[in-house]
Image (tube, coloured by chain):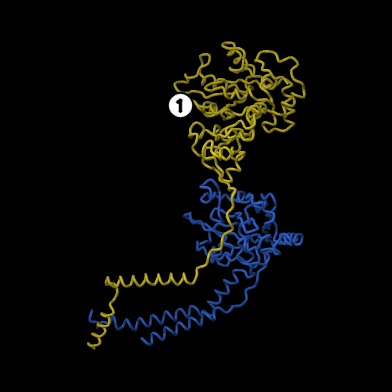
Chain colours: A blue, B yellow
Amino acid sequence: MALDRRSLLKGAALTAAAATVGTAPAGARERRAAPADAVGLLYDTTRCIGCKACVVACKEANNMPPDTDGYGGGLYDAPEALNETTRNVIQLYQGEDETSFVKRQCMHCVDPGCVGACMLGALQKREYGIVTWDGSRCIGCRYCQVACPFNVPKFEWSKKAPKIVKCELCVHRLREGKEPACSEVCPRQAVIFGTRAELLAEAHRRLAGHPDRYVPKVYGEHELGGTQCLYLSHVPFEKLGFRFQHDEPVPEVQQTVQHGIYQGFAAPLALYAVLGAVMFRNRRNGAGETGPDSPDS
Amino acid sequence: MPSSLVPIGLPPPAGGMNRRDFLRICTMAAAAVGLSGTAAAKIAEAVAQGRKPSVIWLSFQECTGCTESLLRTSHPALDELILDLVSLDYHEALMAPSGHLAERAREQAMRENDGKYILVVEGAIPTKDGGIYCKIGGRTALDLVTEAAQHAGAIISIGSCASFGGIPAADPDPTGAKGAPQVLEGKTVVTLPGCPANPYIFLGVALQYATFGTLPALDDLGRPLFAYGRTIHEHCPRRPHFDAGRFAVQFGDEGHRQGWCLYKLGCKGPQTYASCSVLHFGDVVNAWPIGIGHPCFGCTEQKLAFRVPLHDTAEIERPMPPDTYPAVAVEREGVSPVATGVAGLVGGALLGAGMMASRKLGLWPENGAESAGGAASAGKE
């Protein structure tokens, strides 16, 4: 028994050592730049009047059924947030003395967490840098949902053959030479469509022109490695539900952790060492218990 | 502008109308059907050249409500309509002759305008027992409408009864009443359902046919899209109340008096394709059900009118966002260390209890037995 105990402790120590080694950064991952053809949206909270024309247009353009489960007892298409039938939604922030609408849709990150998490490449940045979902490669693991810092990809829980539902920037309309439905229909140009470079320039032009009107940053220029959908706001971004303000893209963290754990195959080796010790212990004990000379047999 | 009614067969009132009035009427008629200003000029030209469309108006199982509403148009007024814009050659309620003279007028008009006249059907056509439940001059409605349709240039069924049976076809439908499109299968019938149909829709269709020889774009039920392309709900003056969730729930309650949405009183607006909310009846503003505080009863829809109870609520075919907003998602509260500890204790206690229970059931090797066995084998060695 003493030996077992010792080996067990040894294994535990080895595992701990491996874990410590594992947390050390395993080589810096290169910060990515937006693709040359990157397109996106620029949403400006000071221009949005909350008419929800974009919500209606999005549903029509993407042929999505209404979500009548929420407010109003089935009379309205009233999604609370992005969900399996809603790729775009307008939410309201109501603070003490300031209010703001905020539009939610996929941010089309420059280095997306969902793409980093997707093990078979169902989610990838494809034409125009738009993150699209390829059903033929999806196994339904929903890692993308966990990995997304904006809580965007949704899973069709109500379907027998569920898909991942998210904004794909109306790529089917772009192919026809049209712009996304939401920006096309917006009556106040609160959301506009363009290349990422154009939108960034326009955002900075607005910031420079009315520094009193905005929080002095373009959300998505650097945040989480940059996004193709950009935001201007008169309310701090944290209050609009943008939880992360740091610049590291999600895949950097993912890779650091995973490459760290598997560096030199240390963690698996440690695990198998512990398992081996347990088996060894069991064999020693088992020889006494179930031996042919046991009085029970 | 002449305003007094003149029966058919009498000469127009002395002086008639001046050119400006006449052009104005034609413009109004064109505007009613959504045609351009140049179309108005063409209508005027056609009418001035004497190419007034011959109209034969057959009335069957009906209440004459559609004619009554036509009498109350003011741009153009009925006298202008029947004297200057169309040639109303047969209309039982409006024509001066009666009996054999009237029937002769119909036959003559059909002969003279063979293939060109506009046949208007008002009222349902009974088909049961050979159609004997509606006869004019000894001939059944079925017979009359079939004959008139054979030589007509265009067929318009005005009102819900002529379009799909309407009230006569409502349960229990003792006469087997049918609309003109069902009786005249294979022919293009422009249906103008409504109880009554808005007369301006009729004028627009009739004048477009008279001037251009064409019919407006129709939906799958033969209804002109310019008038029946959208639901009442889409243009309802009370729509903001619907979007804001403000409903009258009882006639005369606070909401009803405030002019709130009538959906919960059974309004069929969300399922009813018609232009009532934008094209007023008889030029009286708000003279339509919702305008006077009554739910729309879906008179233009075969699936609703006279079939679905008046105060049953309708399906919302295309739900739209309400006038409310979801809040920015609130951050989920994290789990406190204490809660985690408590949960762990509870889980451990459950596990322990399970183990103890299984031990009592004899599913777990007894410590005592194990050590006894070990001692025995050791002794044997």
Can see residue A297? no
How busy is the neighbourhood of tag 1: few (under 14 within 10 Å), some, or many (20 plus)? some
Q: Amino acid at mark 1?
A: Asp
Return the residue nearer the eye: B224 or B152. Answer: B224
Q: Is residue B281 left or right of residue A2?
A: right
- Residue A210, horizontal then vertical, whole percent: 75, 59
Q: Secondary structure at mark 1?
A: loop
* Farthest front residue in view: B254
- Residue A221, horizontal then vertical, whole percent: 68, 65
Q: Which residue is mark 1?
A: B173
Q: Which of the 4 image quarters holds residue B279? A: top right
- Residue A213, horizontal then vertical, whole percent: 72, 59
- Vertical placement of residue A199 versus B342, above or below: above
* Farthest top residue in view: B100
Can see residue A24? yes
Q: Is residue A288 left or right of residue B334?
A: left
Return the residue nearer the eye: B211 or B202. Answer: B202
Quadrant (top left, top right, bottom left, bottom right) of the C terminus of chain B: bottom left
Return the residue nearer the eye: A63 or A2. Answer: A2
Question: Which residue lies at the image location 62% right of the left edge and 54% below the top edge?
Answer: A170
- Vertical placement of residue A188 versus B285, above or below: below
- Vertical placement of residue A72 versus B256, above or below: below
Question: Which residue lies at the image location 50% right of the left edge and 36% below the top edge?
Answer: B311
